[in-house]
Image (tube, rainbow, N blue to C red):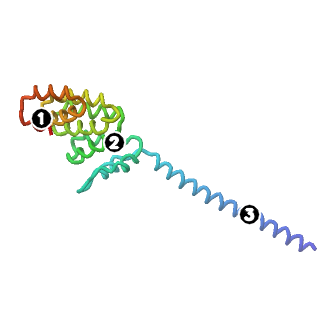
């Protein structure tokens, strides 16, 4: 009888021991699953890296993929502004960054694009204005009109043409005044297209 009690105690201890092992393994796997979940949620909510955005701007036959850029998350516009303003980068990446900025209708983006359009004479000014017009025309038409009106006197003729075409669709009176005041006949002709 003593043997049987001792065997029962060993069996009960064995069961308890097995329960503890199972519980420890369960907790171990649960902990691992939690770590994976935490890492994936961290990845989903982190700001995009400049290298990621630069890679999205690469490609021989590049087109602006709105969903991909908008899915980058918060801070994407800041990275694109950084790329667009980075004079050490090759121009086509900067041009594409300007185009992608048209997707981000934030105040920071608006200020950057306006400043670029007004304070540059190069093709970056034209890219800045085009991105501003494309991104803000529907939500802030008065702001686009004010900038386009100011750019009618820009030293770069391509910017004047683009601004005139924009004004033509917004305010015909300002457009007519521009046609009368523009000294270059070819600019007036291009603006009317």
Find residue 51 and report its horizontal and vertical position in percent. Answer: 33, 49
Which quadrant is the C terminus positioned in? top left
| Mark 1 → mark 3, Cα distance in angstroms | 81 Å
Q: Quadrant of residue 83?
A: top left
Q: Residue 167, relative to residue 99: is it above or below?
A: above
Which quadrant is the N terminus positioned in? bottom right
Find residue 8 and report its horizontal and vertical position in percent. Answer: 86, 70
User: Along the polypeptide, which appears first: circle 2 or circle 3?
Assistant: 3
Circles 1 and 3 in contact, beta carbons < 8 Å: no
Label 1 or label 3, whichever lies nearer to me, is 1
| Mark 2 → mark 1, Cα distance in angstroms | 26 Å
Q: Quadrant of residue 82?
A: top left
Question: Is 39 in front, or is 64?
Answer: 64
Find residue 100 and report its horizontal and vertical position in percent. Answer: 30, 44
Q: Residue 190, relative to residue 145: is it above or below?
A: below
Disc 3: CA contacts within 10 A as few (<14), some (14-19) or many (>=20): few
User: Along the polypeptide, which appears first: circle 2 or circle 1?
Assistant: 2
Q: Determine which residue is flagged by label 1.
A: 157
SS assignment at label 1: helix
Disc 2: CA contacts within 10 A as few (<14), some (14-19) or many (>=20): many
Residue appearing at x 35%, y 39% in the figure: 104
Question: Is 58 in front, or is 153?
Answer: 153
Q: Determine which residue is flagged by label 3.
A: 19
SS assignment at label 3: helix
Q: Residue 121, relative to residue 38: is it above or below?
A: above
Residue appearing at x 53%, y 50% in the figure: 38
| Mark 2 → mark 3, Cα distance in angstroms | 57 Å
Q: Is residue 112 left or right of residue 154?
A: right
- Label of residue 103 in the image: 2
């Amino acid at each position: 009888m003593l043997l049987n009690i001792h065997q029962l105690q060993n069996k009960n201890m064995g069961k308890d021991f097995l329960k503890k092992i199972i519980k420890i393994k369960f907790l171990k796997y649960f902990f691992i699953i939690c770590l994976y979940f935490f890492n994936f949620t961290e990845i989903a909510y982190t700001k995009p890296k400049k290298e990621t955005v630069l890679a999205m701007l690469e490609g021989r036959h590049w087109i602006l993929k709105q969903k991909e850029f908008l899915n980058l998350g918060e801070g994407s516009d800041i990275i694109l502004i950084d790329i667009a303003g980075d004079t050490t980068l090759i121009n086509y990446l900067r041009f594409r960054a300007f185009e992608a900025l048209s997707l981000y209708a934030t105040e920071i983006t608006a200020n950057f694009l306006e400043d670029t359009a007004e304070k540059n004479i190069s093709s970056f000014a034209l890219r800045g204005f085009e991105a501003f017009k494309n991104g803000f025309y529907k939500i802030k038409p008065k702001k686009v009109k004010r900038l386009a009106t100011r750019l009618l006197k820009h030293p770069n003729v391509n910017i004047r043409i683009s601004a005139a075409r924009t004004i033509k669709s917004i305010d015909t009176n300002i457009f007519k005044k521009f046609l009368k005041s523009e000294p270059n006949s070819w600019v007036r002709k291009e603006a009317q297209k």
